[in-house]
Image (cartoon, grey):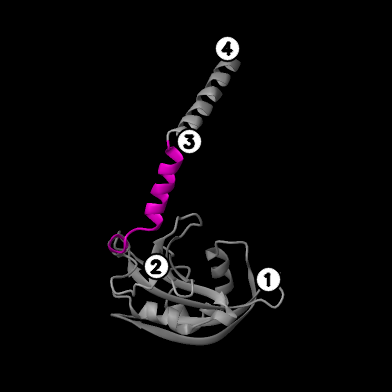
Amino acid sequence: MGCLKSIIKKIIIIALIIAFFAFGGWALLKQKLNDYKNPTRNEFVESERYYADFSSVPEDYQLTRSFNFFGYKKINAKYLPTGQKITIFDLRNENKISPKDFETKEIDSKITILLDKLKDSFITFENFEIINRGAYRAENKTIPYIVFSADVKNIPFKKIIGVLGAYSSKNKNSKASTKIILSIVDKKAYNPNIVNNFAASLKF
């Protein structure tokens, strides 16, 4: 009897899966996922206001959401003329990294561990070097940042330039959390104005 019940359950599950695909369930799911990742500009500005006010971000930056698979919520801004991506991560608290770490240079010793936690691919970096420090001037907030270079591990002669910045803002629960701005590009494609202009357009 137990064996028969198990077989019936499997048949029902297979039937449901077939029905899901046959009656457009997969297409509907893909549409829902796309709508979440690519909202209208107005919807994005409203729903992600706890990161910052994005209403003044130029139109050549495409604003999108990402799914939270790695423990941190994140949003993206893609600079359409070159395809460079800027990601803002919500670390949800200020214990791991804070803007003060950039002032005290504590970030120098934390960058390797931080990038390893934030990466969304199997690519890893080595031979880090801090090549510049500064602060973006957004409306009502200063965002400290560093510019670093690194080698791509296991890819000979492949170098990248990365920009890493941090600021604090309040989430829906009114608790402050650290937001990380990160953009990594091939060394030959590095243009400091892409992240600079994006950060300068943010309002708080």
Q: Secondary structure at mark 2?
A: strand
Residue 34 against residue 169 in the figure, above or below:
above
Q: Circle 2: is it few (<14), some (14-19), or many (20+) Cα within 10 Å?
A: some
Q: Quadrant of the C terminus?
A: bottom left
Q: Quadrant of residue 156?
A: bottom right
* Residue range (magenta): 24-44
Q: Are marks 3 and 1 in contact (CB under 8 Å)?
A: no
| Residue depicted at 48% across the width and 75% down the height | 82
Which of disc 4 and disc 1 is earlier in sequence? 4
What amino acid type is highlighted by mark number 4? Met
Distance between the Cα atoms at labels 1 and 2? 30 Å
Which element type, helix, strand or loop, lies under badge 3? helix
Q: Nearer the viewer, mark 4 or mark 2?
A: 2
Mark positioned earlier in the residue sequence (3 or 2): 3
Residue located beneath label 3 in the image: 21
- Which residue ends up furthest to the top in the rendered image? 1
Amino acid on which disc 2 is placed = Gln
**Left or right of 43 in this view: 9:** right
- Is 34 inside the magenta-drawn segment? yes
Q: Determine whether, in the image, residue 15 is placed left or right of residue 51.
A: right
For label 4, the crowd category at 10 Å Cα-Cα, with few meaning under 14, some 14 to 19 and many 20 or more, is: few
